[in-house]
Image (spheres, rainbow, N blue to C red):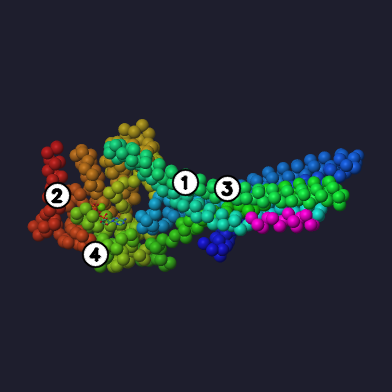
Amino acid sequence: MDKKDTREIIKRILKDYIYQHKTKLLVSFFCMALIAAATAGNAWLMQPVLDEIFINKNQKLIFIIPIIVFLIALTKGIASYFQSILMSFVGYKMVAQIQKDMFENLIRCDLSYFNQINSGTLVSRFISDVGSISRGIHNVIVNIIKDSLTFIFLVGVMFYHDTKLAVISLFIFPLAIYPISRIGKRLRKISKNTQVGFGLLTSKLAESIGSIKTIKSFNNETHETQKISKEIDNIFNLTFKSTKVNSISRPLMETLGGLAIAIIIFIGGSQVIMEQTTPGTFFSFLTALLMAYQPVKSLATLNATLQIAMASAERIFEILDEQPQIKNLERTEDHKFKSIKSQNLKISNLSFKYNSSDKLILKDINLEILDGEKIAIVGYSGAGKTTLMNLLPRFFDPNKGQITIGGINIKNLSLEFLRNHFSLVSQDIVLFDQTLQYNVSYGKDRVLKKDIELACRKANCNEFINKFPNKLNQQIGEDGTKLSGGQKQRVAIARAFLKNAPFLLLDEATSSLDSKSESRINKSLDSLMNNRTTLVIAHRLSTIINADRIVILHNGRVADIGTHKNLLKKSVIYKDLYELQFKNKNAKKNTST
Ligand SMILES: Nc1ncnc2c1ncn2[C@@H]1O[C@H](COP(=O)(O)OP(=O)(O)OP(=O)(O)O)[C@@H](O)[C@H]1O
Ligand SMILES: [Mg+2]
């Protein structure tokens, strides 16, 4: 990144996250100026202390100078306190605001974005990048205001006492600037790699902990430990490298500083010996010079700090600037929906591929689902069934062709309106670590308890809910771990009952359940499909038998459409699928009951 980009990023941070706190910042700047003045004041006081009290033995000043010293310390103390809390307030507010903005934008990104990005990377951007940018900006502001002012005031004291000596000591500072700017560039690169490393560690940790059962069943603990150790070592190497590079700047400055002091003592000391200047003036000068090293050292690392913060800012803005492709048109046709005669769902000439690959998953699909019809989709695993279903609520958009409801292209409806019309019960049910009630009524703001109870009853949930001591207020654990597979499915069905949308998208679970549990789920699913236009990816025999039409999806194409009976006669694929998936399952059930 060049200077221009850095300037753009800083401008944006100032405008979006700093400017709104300008009053607090101004007060804080004022406090910083007081601190700087107090520091310089202390250095300046060395002269009267030495010359007037110690050498001239001035009786009056013996009272006045200590009082001034105390007042300066008091002012500096109060100013430091306010400067610190005001700056921290602005810093933490900035962190909070950036994190909120990031999440707000992220949650609206397309599903395809989440398919591409690694979750650990996202978490690391939320936590460590935001922290690093805030620390960076804090340090840069304090450097620029407090340290520069302190430096300027102290140099003022030096020039006031002895211009020639002041010029000589200042000569040595610029020597250090070149190596320090080089260090900044290297640090930025290392910092970038470190953040990537943290992201990888986070996601691998989450993956290992989440798959603990699989790991144990394969006795693979050692392998996992090695995997995580590798990431930890990588981070160790990078952080240590960063410290090594960073650590060069301080000794460099200190050596150069020592050189300056040595030269000043030689020249200034000679002047005192020759009585060209007073000891007080010389000591005041030397004190100012010594005190000036602290702010200069901070200023020397300013670039490094800035570089690290900029690297983080780049990654944060990447998330803030990610724009969804699937979004509302400026003028939607939601209002037209009321006047349409039938809500027929029509898929025309549709082709689709995922961004991550070139292979078309769906090819030239044509299908019309009539109002109230039940369509079952069958096909081998990987045929594209779930993919097709995902296009209806626009989780993804087709690359070719279109989907209409009652003649209205779904792209012309608002996403909220469209998705309100679909209930989705997917293959993999995801529940929140909350109460049953929260999970069933998820996405509904105002909902009556009796409606939740009714939905649970219809989904056959009552049988297990009543066994919980807290009933609907039962916490179900992360991803519903406190529920069985069948119970989770019924919670998902209850959700769909409560949502009561006209279209039902049902991706039946492939996992086999015991027959008692399955018959309960069958019953609730059948009643859920009642009176709803349904597209169901079928894995149960009863579904295909009761469907109005069955669509065979094969290699991304519609291979055939028909009823169970006539497909058995005319379609080889269907017969094979029937033997493979439906008939056997049924036979198994017959033997087990
Ligand atoms: N997010 C994704 N990115 C890239 N390719 C994907 C993605 N999801 C699925 N695919 C690919 O698309 C093809 C169809 O997947 P899909 O999930 O639609 O199959 P399916 O018919 O539902 O299978 P199953 O019966 O096993 O659930 C598969 O070959 C799969 O590898
Ligand atoms: Mg599927």
Q: Amino acid at mark 3?
A: Ser
Q: Earlier in the sequence, mark 4 or mark 3?
A: 3
Query: N-terminal of the two: label 1 or label 3?
Result: 1
What residue do we see at 80% from left, 48% from top? 269
What residue is disc 1 on? 237
Q: Please name the amino acid that badge 1 sits on.
A: Asn
Alpha carbon of mark 4 to alpha carbon of mark 1: how far? 49 Å
Of the two numbered discs 2 and 1 in the rendering, the one whose residue sits closer to the viewer: 1
Residue count near mark 2 (Cα–Cα under 10 Å), binned few <14, some 14–19, many ≥20: few
Using the image, tell me which numbered label, if any, was put on residue 363: 4
Asked whether residue 167 is in view, the answer is: yes
Front-most of residues 279 and 533: 279
Judge whether residue 523 can be spotted in this image.
Answer: no
Residues at marks 4 and 3, CA–CA distance in whole angstroms:
60 Å
Q: Which residue is mark 2?
A: 580
Whether residues under marks 4 and 2 lie with C-beta atoms below 8 angstroms apart, the answer is no
Q: Disc 4, disc 1: CB below 8 Å?
A: no
Residue at 52% across, 51% down: 130
